[in-house]
Image (tube, helix red, strand yellow):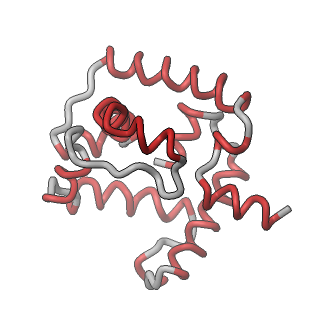
Amino acid sequence: MFLRAARYLSRPLSPEDERRLYDELLRLGAILGINDRDMPATPEEFWPYFDTMIQEELESTVVVRELLDPGRPIAPPPGSGRLLRGLWPLLRRPLGRLHVFVTVGLLPPAARDRLGVPWTPGDERRLCRFGAVVRTLVPLLPERLRYLPTARAARAAGR
């Protein structure tokens, strides 16, 4: 999904960036306690593993159905300002639908097929248009609007 998100929402990653991302994901897996044997060591080893997981293991569980339910309750982002919290009852439903739309759109087609999640050529065009808007507008936003509070704090600490 990271690669698909980059392709739609920012820019496709170069092979070097893909390898760096994969190395970062391996480090994240280690931090989260995922065993090395459960994470292929290289991107080249990952893709056959990924295909096998899609074909043989992926299934529509309660959690998957909940994540793909546009009506599920969603809390405002942590650290939201008073204005956003006040508007949240009006924003929750459209943002929930948008969240599910983007999530489904960023799923690899094989995963959508396996889960029985519909995706039409019209959906694909809408996702491409949405990505064009994101790629155009997000760089113009001030940092306080581009990042959630935790990410802003991490960026500030990094500087």
- Could you say which is closer to the camera, residue 47 or residue 12? 12
The picture places residue 148, in percent across and down from the top left corner, at 59, 51
* Number of marks drawn: 0
**In screen coordinates, is 115 left or right of 94?**
left
Q: Residue at x 27, y 21 (%)?
A: 120
Residue 109, image quadrant: top left
The picture places residue 149, in percent across and down from the top left corner, at 61, 56
The quadrant of the image that shows the C terminus is bottom right
**In screen coordinates, is 131 left or right of 112?**
right
Residue 6, image quadrant: top right
**In screen coordinates, is 117 left or right of 93?**
left
**In screen coordinates, is 54 left or right of 83?**
left
The picture places residue 9, in percent across and down from the top left corner, at 56, 33
Q: Residue at x 58, y 27 (%)?
A: 134
Q: Is residue 46 above or below residue 105?
A: below
Residue furthest to the right in view is: 159
Residue 101, image quadrant: top left
* Residue 59 showing in the rendered view: yes
Q: Is residue 126 above or below residue 71?
A: above
- Could you say which is closer to the camera, residue 123 or residue 50? 123
The picture places residue 141, in percent across and down from the top left corner, at 70, 32
* Residue 113 showing in the rendered view: no
Q: Residue at x 48, y 71 (%)?
A: 40
Q: Residue at x 54, y 47 (%)?
A: 81
- Could you say which is closer to the camera, residue 86 or residue 57? 86
- Could you say which is closer to the camera, residue 93 or residue 124? 93
